Image (cartoon, rainbow, N blue to C red):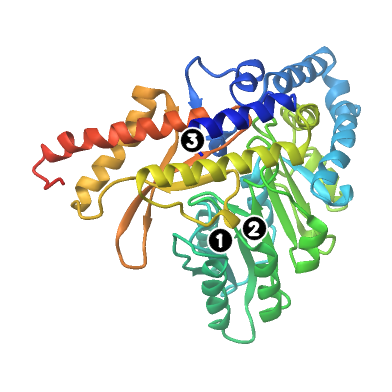
Amino acid sequence: MDLRLNLFFVHLSIHCQGIPFGKPTREKYFQFQPGFLNFNHGGFGATPLLVREAQSGFVDQQEAQPTAWFASGGYQKILSEVRPRLAEMMNANSSDVVFLDDASSGLNAVLRSLPWQPQDVMLLTSAAYAVLPNTGKWLQKRYGIQILQAEVHFPAESAETILEPVEQALLELPQPCKLRLAVFDHVSSYPPAILPVARLARMVKARCAETLVLLDGAHALGQVPIDMKQLAEAGVDAYVTDGHKWLMAPKGSGALWASRSIQDILEPAIISSDNVPTTKFQDRFDYIGTRDYTSWCAMGAALDFREMLGGEEKIQGYTSQLAGWAGRMMAGAFGTETVVPLTMTPSMFAVRLPIPSEWPTDAQQRCAGVIAGGLIEKYSMQVISFSVHQKSGNVTHWIRVSSQIYLEQQDFLALTHAVLTLRQSCKSRVGGLGSVIV
């Protein structure tokens, strides 16, 4: 079927269902600069106007009676209403969920609360977000722990690309096992991929039964289903996630789920004046001093907004299908590939840029910069560019592209045209530097 005819039928279907996804949603509910296309929702999210207005109302309550808001149960009452709804979305018990500023603060809370001993081991994959190896280095310096990194190579053909190097790393651990913690992304950032986290957790527990398993779900909430009861059965002990990304809650919102077996040892990044040794798990995290709690409160408005638009199945169905279509379309237009198969693709994907591998390395790098820079400077399109170091030693160049309810097929067609136009400009720019261009 012709691509533009296919586009027409998709839009007809959307409007017949009364779902104004795409440009209508962008113009009605978001506050983007005119002409700007945000293909980097995975980076910093985008908060709908209705959610921002709800947060502003909470700020008004806070400033109307500050003492009542902070010290007499004001914001806590709102959190008590939001928490069970958030827990339901994660298929978790609300008593096991606390609020966070973001996933990074949750990762730090877990990593820095554990009773590390010299020569204890923390297992990461090479796809881990930078906050994990950075915090690991801090723990290494402070406690003398060891960091074990399982090298995962992309592009990936299947989940086995993730499982095999982790299994190999576990098999190389000496006994008795000193692996205290294993950390995996639920949805990785660079490159974007859904990891087989339940299988990874079972693999860890089978090798080292006492090891704790922590999942970094920064990109998961609102992008893929989260089932904490199922993950807990697989051996997951803690899970952190962001609210400001795919849930579309305000910046400064997130959540931590922790199994009851470890709740007593977990402390927030900030230990407040109300946090004494007998303070309960949720109370320790719910008050961390005089700060803005309205972003946590407004997570309820984000849930309301999503329900108004049709709920999780409709939203996640639209964004994942759009990402799958766009990834295939762009890879076909570029003559390249996506970084993982469709079964591992969430609502964001990575596609290899159409830069010939026979070009000199520095020419390829410069062309990738021309494309990434030109997209924002000339076309007002925001993507994330990154490089992948392959097993062969070659370096390939990619862009990470997010789907979202405010984007539609026409936007991805425009992005594809922009990339190809900028790629053509590399011929003169790169060739003029003395490189052999074909």
Labels 3 and 2 touching (C-beta < 8 A): no
Label 1: which secondary element: helix
- Please state which of residues 143 and 341 is positioned toward the viewer in this rendering: 341
Labels 1 and 2 touching (C-beta < 8 A): yes
Disc on the earlier residue, 3 or 2: 3
Residue at position x 70%, y 31% in the image? 249
Q: Is residue 412 left or right of residue 207?
A: left
Q: Which mark is residue 3?
A: 3
Determine the CA span between mark 1 and mark 3: 52 Å
Q: Which mark is residue 111?
A: 2
Residue at position x 75%, y 55% in the image? 266
| In the rendered image, the vertical position of residue 124 relative to residue 173, given as above or below | above
Determine the CA span between mark 1 and mark 2: 8 Å
| In the rendered image, the vertical position of residue 417 relative to residue 31, given as above or below | below
Label 2: which secondary element: helix
Could one spot residue 234 in this view of the protein?
yes
Residue at position x 20%, y 46% in the image? 363
Nearer the camera: disc 3 or disc 2: 3
Determine the CA span between mark 3 and mark 2: 48 Å
Residue type, mark 2 in image: Leu
Label 3: which secondary element: helix
Reading the image, the residue beneath label 1 is 139
Q: Residues within 10 Å of mark 2 (few under 14, many from 20)?
A: many
- Percent coordinates x, y for residue 276 in the rendering: 83, 48
Could one spot residue 269 in this view of the protein?
no
